[in-house]
Amino acid sequence: MAKKKHIFTPVSEKEVTRAIVDGFARQFIEYVESDCLIIGGGPSGLMVGRDIALKGVKTLIVERNNYIGGGFWIGGYLMNKVTVREPGQKILEELDIPYEKAVKGLYVADGPHACSKLIAAACDAGVKFANMTIFDDVVLREGNRVCGAVVNWTPVNALPREITCVDPIALEAKFVVDSTGHDACVVKKLEERGIIKTAGFGAMWVDRSEDLVVEHTGEAHPGLIVTGMAVATTYGLPRMGPTFGGMLLSGRKGAQVILQKMKRK
Amino acid sequence: MSDFIRPIPSTIDLYQEGDSGSLDIAKIGEYLEEKTHIPFHNRGNLYKKIPQKKLEEIAKELARVRVQDPGKRFVSKAPFQGEVDYERSRISDPKWKIFGILYEGVLYKKVISDLIFKGGVDFECCPVLFTNQLFGTWDRDNHRYHARVSLYGFPNLISITGLVIAPAKPKEFYLKKQMGTPVEWLKEEYREMFLDHGDSRMTEVLKGYGMQALLFHLTGDPFCADRDCRLFNSHWQEEVLHSQMDGKYEFCPRHEKILKGLRERR
């Protein structure tokens, strides 16, 4: 009687483990030092990463959740439609994300489709990710220039210290991006150290906040680029509603700032 | 002319800051000249003759006078470079459209005053700046900043954006908005009852505010208690539209007499 063929090649458990550890370790060692370390894998962080990685910039995105994409999966009130205002739809077109016109100047896309395409675009461009990794502190050099981040595993951070007394580790980079949304974690850490003073975001004003967020995107402190909603928190700009064009365009502007600064260096 | 506390200015100087949309500043000047016989100069963009180095200084000053929290008293802080960069971009572009930052009105006026008067005050001219930016003043009664349409002094500031935002819209507008009616529908429904950005009535309405500025210069009091007079201090959009466009007369008898006297004197 003929022996039945397996669909998959037989591999032992230890080989699976070795492959995971080896793959992770090789990438991690390589990215302990990068050109750009992006804290926060939401739409603006992904957009920065995608645009700079396309230009050959070595980029690592640190994301505290298991999933990448932040709030881009869903729109307002847990409804999975995301909206962008003109000219944000041009980025949707660039990323090959289908969308419909809602009213003049406002476009709507499926959250899962838009978000997964943006993540894929970042991956295709060469961005690497450290997910389930939480930002803990900044690495500072002469003149308080930000040149890296101290990180830890998210679960370690979530448990009481008596149970998980695990020290964090540091990653270095030429530039750090704070794309952590309203929390503005990196900027807030500088504030904790008395280096800068943020204003906190104002009331929601969709009509105006997107423009202001994009216009204020840039280097808030030497070595630290702020994008997305972290910009609103840093400068006390009006809070944005569930429309994502500002996040995408802010990410793009953040990327332009980094590329210009790297060129100058 | 016992109403006058200052000399009659020899010119009314009209300045502009940022994109003024459909506003026709020359028409406002012509109106003021016709009513007072004081010639006007349309000076255009406030920052047009300012050297780059000075622009950087002004940008820093403007970044310093932003209201960070409208619910708290103003506290001056060292601005971020990002804020200075934003202000520099804004004042370098005469067609700058973006607004949304609330500036501390009195301090904002001081920055503009230093720019126009170079440290002193000259009563020979009556400068009026039409800006697309927002400024506010602290309200001692309810302990918060309120956006304003105008701030009279030396110079006078008039906010085109403030005219849309500061005077309250009809109560029904806010009630329906709270109940979830989309703003675009409400704008359509109440279009005749308030001014919107780029409104074709803006020039006509702001003629009255220009006159308030001149009356402040002359008498120290820009306002009139008569809601049919263009000098009425409106708090509601309906009052703005009534006093500026549908009043019984342009100016109440007392102010009409002042203006007549001014014309005869010139």
Image (spheres, coloured by chain):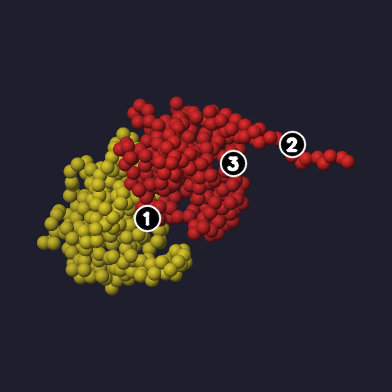
Chain colours: A red, B yellow
Q: Amino acid at mark 1?
A: Ala
The answer to which of marks 2 and 3 sits earlier in the sequence is: 2
Q: Which mark is residue A121?
A: 3
The reply to whether residue B17 is visible in this rendering is yes
The reply to whether the C-beta atoms of the residues labelled 1 and 2 are less than 8 Å apart is no
Q: Quadrant of the N terminus of chain B?
A: bottom left
For the residue labelled by badge 2, is the local secondary structure a helix, a strand or a loop?
A: loop
At which x and y percent is residue A116?
59, 47
Mark 1 secondary-structure assignment: loop
Image coordinates of residue A258 in percent, x first then y, are 46, 34
* Amino acid, disc 3: Ala
How far apart are the two marked residues, 3 and 1, measured between alpha carbons?
Answer: 33 Å
- Mark 3 vs 1, N-terminal side: 3
At which x and y percent is residue B197?
A: 40, 58
User: Which dot, 1 or 2, sits closer to the camera?
Assistant: 2
Q: Which residue is mark 1?
A: A203
Determine whether label 2 and label 3 are within 8 Å by CB: no
